[in-house]
Amino acid sequence: MSNFGYFVSKLGDHGMGRALRHRDYAIYALAGWISNIGLWVQKTALFWLLWELTNSYSALGALAFAEAIMTILVMPYAGTLTDRYDRLKMARIVQVALLSIGTLFAVLSALDLITIHILFGLVMINGIAEGFWTPLRMTMPPSLVPREDLPAALGVSAAMFNLAQFIGPALGGIIVAFFGVTYAFIFNAASFLGYLLVLFIITLRYDEVVSRKTEGFIKEFKAGLIYIAETAGLRRFLVLSLGASLLMRAYRELFAGISDGIFGMGVEGLAILSSAAGLGALVTALYLGNFGKIKGLIRSILIFLFVAVVAQIALASATVFWFAVLSAAVLSATATYAGIGGQLLVQNTIHGAVRGRVMSVWGMILRGGPASGAWMVGTIAGFSDLQFAFYTATGLFVVVLLWTLPKAKNMAANLERSSEERDAADS
């Protein structure tokens, strides 16, 4: 075997390489990465367009919330459907919808027909599609790799997402600055097309959808909530995650205002702040993907969240742009560790038959929390200033963190085990 062949074979036995040795997962992850770059290009264009129209922190938060509330409203239903039907067929349908919405953005922008009301309306429609896509996206990795390679697969997905988060805003800033927002929307629509094609190539190797008689949406989703409540430690951990998502991840949606309103850096500053946050998150994702273990995750998540508190205070206090950039990178790295580590814990500890419903709740937390937090922080900033708003959010999260600490050992004992290990211990 050549030296290169030996290197490749070794790469497939360690860290994230364990996931990439599975062909279908590898091409799925690559297509998702390209699509996520398009997503961040579009987000950069949207928030910059709205800032130009309004110069309002509250409007930025409201736009994020408008999309997120639609996502939150449909996600329980979407999660239940994900546990009922063929996930791959559903994914294809949702991607067609996302492609259509992205194309509509581009066409209306090219015709100069986008107003504030149309912007909010399209974003809300996009939020509905994202609400169906989120539980589908989160249930794909366990259906493409065996359980022993799931941590590696989640690490790859997170690394790809955050690499896109690093590249996308920078690329979006360049496209908006030199070509205009229309080309940013075109780029995003094109990225969805490739993702859609891949969904017709891959097959799900591990089907977790159990053939059973359906009992109605409300009853089935309620069963998912009961499962969460009865799984020791899971409910408290989800409350902690909600607090972190709501109070410690609202900064990203406000970057346009921070860049231009505080430092006068324009769309270039928005791209720099967003990319710095993406870089911090990418470092965390690469670490978890290659070295992350289930054992000890609760303790390390809590440590990283304490660091996030310091970083958010630093971001709020920054008077020099590049110190704000550094603070954003650290805050993003620590908050992302909690997000990826949390998903790894939840995915590892739940049964496959309820995965769609439980992950829809997790998706509501991760998707709705930052947007709702951005609206809250932006509204408070409108009545006082952005620094006070961030201080308020950080103080509230410290209360949540202190409420969690006494039960940390209990959460670790229960959540750092697979569903099979728990079942064996209970029998």
Image (cartoon, grey):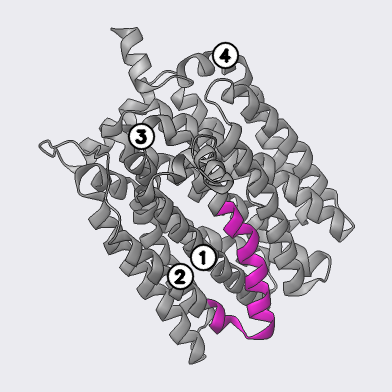
Which residue is denoted by mark 3 in the rendering?
146
In the rendered view of the protein, which quadrant contains the C terminus? top left
Which mark lies nearer to you, 2 or 4? Answer: 2
Question: Which residue is pictured at 20% across the width and 44% down the height?
Answer: 84
Identity of the residue furthest to the front in this view: 1
Which amino acid type is shown beneath numbered disc 1?
Answer: Leu
Secondary structure state at the residue bearing disc 4: helix
| 365 lies left or right of 170 | left
Residue 409's disc is 4
Asked if labels 3 and 1 touch by Cβ distance under 8 angstroms, the answer is no
| 405 lies left or right of 126 | right
Q: Residue 239, relative to residue 207: is it above or below?
A: above
Q: Nearer the viewer, residue 37 or 410?
A: 37
Residue 39's disc is 1
Q: Earlier in the sequence, mark 2 or mark 4?
A: 2
Question: Which residue is pictured at 61% across the width and 69% down the height?
Answer: 44
Segment tinted magenta in the rendering: 161-184
Which amino acid type is shown beneath numbered disc 3?
Answer: Pro
Q: Give x and y (percent) for residue 412.
A: 53, 18
Secondary structure state at the residue bearing disc 2: helix
**CA gap, disc 1 and disc 4:** 38 Å
Which amino acid type is shown beneath numbered disc 4?
Answer: Lys
Q: Earlier in the sequence, mark 1 or mark 4?
A: 1
Asked if labels 2 and 1 touch by Cβ distance under 8 angstroms, the answer is yes
Q: Quadrant of residue 248?
A: top right
Q: Nearer the viewer, residue 304 or 10?
A: 10
Q: Main secondary structure of the magenta part?
A: helix
Secondary structure state at the residue bearing disc 3: loop
Q: Earlier in the sequence, mark 1 or mark 3?
A: 1
Q: Nearer the viewer, residue 203 or 70?
A: 203
Q: Earlier in the sequence, mark 3 or mark 4?
A: 3
